[in-house]
Structure formats: structure tokens, C-alpha cells
Amino acid sequence: DTAVSQTPKYLVTQMGNDKSIKCEQNLGHDTMYWYKQDSKKFLKIMFSYNNKELIINETVPNRFSPKSPDKAHLNLHINSLELGDSAVYFCASSQEGFGTGLDEQFFGPGTRLTVL
Amino acid sequence: GESVGLHLPTLSVQEGDNSIINCAYSNSASDYFIWYKQESGKGPQFIIDIRSNMDKRQGQRVTVLLNKTVKHLSLQIAATQPGDSAVYFCAENNSGYSTLTFGKGTMLLVSP
């Protein structure tokens, strides 16, 4: 069984479009994250949610809007896509996360977004 | 291919050798550290972690060493196998915050 799953795995779209990436975890974790990995493999945190509440919002353009309908899901919606948004986006989850130290984060398989 | 122009630090070893991957971390307040392995086309996968009250921790074929004085972390892989070929990331956390800060990554290439 997949612990953290993301859909789609690949997403190719035109500049200016709006797209969403979905993430689900079946681990019963309280905290979920979105990371962006650029072409140089650098991984950077974008958002962190704890029990459906936004905890961390790094310096991400407001075109990116995470939505957490329940504890097991954290979707990423991106408006007005730009060329620089092309990257691999990873969802992750952990049991703890906020203010209690950090437990292991489990990562999804990634979504490769290509903006043309 | 995916690695063209990547310019990641690369460590090339022969199968059976021991590998040592190094990482310098930035925040002296960080108290939790993790090593992740990322194979091509996959998400990062947990290898081993260590808290700042320790200076060494061993797992199966892997050992993490922490030197807080110089803010240095290393991952030692014993008897490296071709399946160990991947990009390895160190990550640090300050327990007051819920995010991990990842290092730049090192590519390990293991030849048979």
C-alpha cells in the first residue's frame, strides 16, 4: 500500500493555466508538507499543514494555494502558471511536526510539472 | 538525461568499498538531523536520523556521525552496492519549527 500518493505523476501545461496536484497519506499522520525540487535537485519547503491548519508558508507566491479538506489530504493549486514553476513537487507527511521536534517525513513519489 | 547540467557533488566508488558522504549544516540551533536517499524518479527516502545529544548512530550498513563543534554531519555506507547509487541529502531541523532544511545533495555512483 502506498503511504503517500500524489496525482498526477507528470503534468505538462501552458503558461497562464491553472492546475492542481493532489496528495493523500494513509499513515494517519497529523502534518503534511509540500516541497519544490528544482532542476539542481535543491529541495525547499513550501507549506506545512498540521491537522488541516496552515503552519508554515515560506516565501511562495500567492499563486500557490494549498488546500487541506481533511487531515489525510493536502492539495496544491497553482494559478497563472509561469515557466519558473517547472519543477518536481513533493508531498510529505510526518506524525509530529509542530513545536514538538520533528519526526521522520515520508515523501510521495513527486509530480513533475512542466510549464511550456 | 536527468543529470545533464546537474553539477551535484559526486562520489564515485566501486562496489564493496565504504562510502562517506559529508554535509555541512548551517544552523547551530538545529537539534535533529536526517539523511535521505533519493533514487532517480522517486521521492526522498529516510535512511537514518540523529539527535543533537548523540554524536554517532548506527543502522544497517549505515552510520551517521555528528560533529556539532564544526556543524558537520557525515553518512558512512559500508560495503556499498550498486543499489546504493542515488542522490543523498542531509536535512536539519530546529525543534522549535516544523520544517526541515535540506542540504544541496551528493550523488553517489557505485560501479560494479
Image (cartoon, coloured by chain):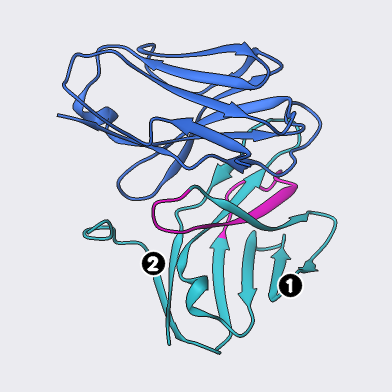
Question: For the point 79% across and 66% down, which residue is it?
Answer: B55
> In the rendering, what colour is chain B?
cyan
Instruction: Give the residues in magenta.
Output: B24-42
Q: Is residue A92 above or below residue A58?
A: below
Residue designated by label 1? B60
Q: Is residue B85 above or below residue A63?
A: below
Compared across the picture, whether B95 is left or right of B83 comes to right
Compared across the picture, whether A40 is left or right of B110 comes to left
Residue designated by label 2? B9
Q: Which sits in the foreground, B63 or A27?
A: A27
> In the rendering, what colour is chain A?
blue
Q: Which sits in the foreground, A95 or B10?
A: A95
- Locate residue B18: give its quadrant: bottom right
Amino acid at the residue labelled 1:
Gln
- Locate residue A53: give its quadrant: top right
**Helix, strand, or loop for circle 2?**
loop
